[in-house]
Image (tube, rainbow, N blue to C red):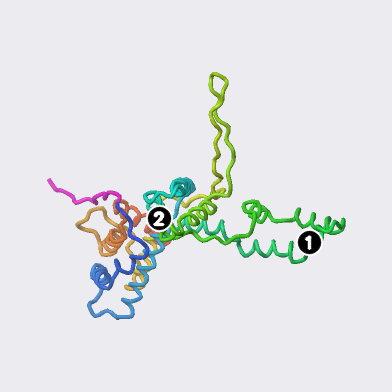
Amino acid sequence: MVVVAAEAKTTSRSLIAISDVEGVFNDEIVKELAQTLKLPADADIARIARFARSIRISAGIFLKEKNKLSFPQMRTAIERLYRLNTRAEEGNDRTAQALAHAVDAMPTDVRQWLLSCNTPHPRFRAAIEPLYQFKFNTRAEGGSDRAARTLTRAVDAMPTEVRKWLLSCNTPHDRNIPTATEILSPATRQSAVERFRLILSWGGRVVPGRKRPGGRRSRSFIKPLLRLPERIERGRPRGEAEREFVLGLALAYVEVTGRSPPRTAHYNIDIRGPFPRFVHRCFELVGAPTGNVTRLLNQYGAPRRRGARRRRTRE
């Protein structure tokens, strides 16, 4: 009986940080990958440098795409930050440490979203400034009917995004997310957590308590209005980041070898070629599962296989 070495499915693992790409794909690893592709030992240094740069760029793009949060994940992260911030407002060292750790570990998507909510977009400024610079509002305060009509037209024509921005804040503000040091220091903790509360939410609404069988209601409470995105564009198809990573590695292969990648990849590990081994190794290095890599490689080669069949048919 012949035993075929099939591709092993790897379990989920942690992806490396984008900041670690340079360290993981260091010169020694690049040499290893070059040997995997059976490049000559005396290959041009400049060509190997371009090869390394292409791999690192592809890995960085892949990790950036994989780190993007969905709307439910974004909402969960912001809600958790608000809960931790509420507890830290009590002044407890332990709760402050928990908040400081969460702020340091805040996903990039969440940080960028909260900063964008608390900093007027340049195009908002361009729409808001005329309302004041041209003194529409100042003139209307003088009681002039003509000035009031001018202000009315300006308000009616106000872009929806600008209107929402103005509704979300009483005064223009440029709030920065507090640092862990600000949160942990007793001298700055109170102002830091208060500022962070304003960053995370833009108010609250009273929620009536539930009506009990006896006719009495539970105590009403205030539910925070968190700064959540109204919608996030529909996510990319499942596995799109992995497919684009394979494409990026294929381009690096073409650049360094001058040849097109093979159109098929074997599931049998013993007869796997240099290019599939190279791609598998890169997936391992970024911490991504490798169980579907052969399938992705065959998907990548499918259009070229169809093109080759059409050419043979015409001939």
Point 39% across, 62% down: residue: 247
- Give the class, few, some or many, for how many residues have Cα within 10 Å of label 1's Cα (few <14, many ≥20): some
Point 33% across, 65% down: residue: 20
Q: Is residue 10 above or below residue 251?
A: above
Q: Which residue is mark 1?
A: 138
Dot 1 amino acid type: Thr
Between discs 2 and 1, the one toward the N terminus: 2
Point 35% across, 75% down: residue: 50
Q: How many marks?
A: 2
Q: Residue furthest top?
A: 214
Q: Quadrant of the N terminus?
A: top left
Circle 1 sits in a helix, a strand or a loop, which is it?
helix
Chain part drawn in magenta: 1-12
Q: Position of residue 212 (x, y in %)?
A: 53, 22
Q: CA distance from mark 2 to mark 1?
A: 44 Å
Q: Which residue is mark 2?
A: 100
